[in-house]
Image (cartoon, helix red, strand yellow):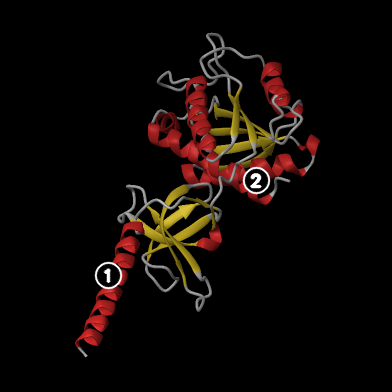
Amino acid sequence: MKSVKAIVLLMFFLLVLSSLGTAIVNAADEGQDQGEAFISASTLNVRSGPGTDYSKLGEVHVGESYHIVDEHTDSSKEYSEWVKISLPENFDYSEGWVSADYVNSYAPLQGISIALDPGHGGPWDPGAVGPTGLTEKEVALDVSLRLENLLEDLGAEVYMTRETDIDVPLWSRVNTATWTGADMFISIHANGSYNRGSQGTETYYSNFFGYQDYYLAASLQNSLVNHLGRMDRGVLNGNHLYILNRSTMPSALVELAFMTNYDEEYLLSTDYFRQSAAQGLTEGIVSYVYNYHY
């Protein structure tokens, strides 16, 4: 009888150890980086738990990526699969849950090549000049370099028509996009006008090459207006622009804001506005690739 009791006690002890070990392993896994979550929805709610019945903590957006720290599946719910992601400092919480239906585990721009063209440049072509002397060429280059970093983080191959303050002829800018076989060509500018009251964001396209140019321009314009919060001046026909009418791939020229407007010149001088512009362009590109790029 004593031997039976001993065996039972031993089996119970082993069972406890096994359960404890599993709990320790699960606890260790919780909070560790389990890969990258690339957001595929234009706007996706972040919740306090794995389900739509949990409170909303904030929003994430298409093209953004976050570290996955946990996963959860509940087949009884409409949205059954959820992932917990690490959140940036601008959130009140360090982690939150998003529906896995709107998350990809691969870089959304993998295999996409993009030619970026910072407008103007060099000693003789500053572009528009603001009331305090800020130049368009400086803003265009800085935003383009920020955009390059964001796009490469999402898997894109990026070609720049210039990376420093140099003069590049228009034909050479177009040739960069053509020779590299880029999937799209985006020229980045800041607007200018004799009327100091002119303000807002606008994007140009050429209709020489079908609807793809318009779709690209519209995606960029919508996202920029969303991020920059300036007046929406619309998507405009740019058939007269050399950059657009000579390109052989979907192309767009964006005017972020007006250098010649006192308020917008100040905004264009700030890191926050420039980074917002780069983020807006990134999300516009991702949206275009998801919805229109074939």
Look at label 1 and name its amino acid: Leu
Q: Crowding near pointer 1: few (<14 within 10 Å), some, many (20+)?
A: few
Kind of residue sitting beneath label 2 = Val
Element type where label 2 sits in the image: helix
Can residue 229 be seen here? The reply is: no
State which quarter of the image contains the N terminus. bottom left
215 sits left or right of 285 in the view: right
* Residue 32 vertical position relative to residue 178 in the rendered view, above or below: below
Q: Nearer the viewer, residue 37 or 241?
A: 37
Residue 92 horizontal/vertical position (percent): 30, 55
Q: Nearer the viewer, mark 1 or mark 2?
A: 1
Residue 41 in which image quadrant: bottom right
Q: Residue at x 22, y 82 (%)?
A: 6
Q: Quadrant of residue 24?
A: bottom left
Q: Nearer the viewer, residue 66 or 89?
A: 66
Q: Report how far apart the C-alphas of labels 1 and 2 lie in the structure.
A: 51 Å
Residue tagged 2: 289
Q: Position of residue 132 (x, y in %)?
A: 40, 20
> Residue 173: percent from the left, percent from the top?
66, 20
Q: Give the mark, 1 or 2, whose residue is nearer the N terminus.
A: 1
Tag 1 secondary structure: helix
- Residue 36's tag is none
Work out whether 70 lies above or below 113.
below
Q: Residues within 10 Å of mark 2 (few under 14, many from 20)?
A: some
Residue, x 46% and y 50% (percent of image)?
Answer: 35
In the image: residue 258, left or right of residue 18: right
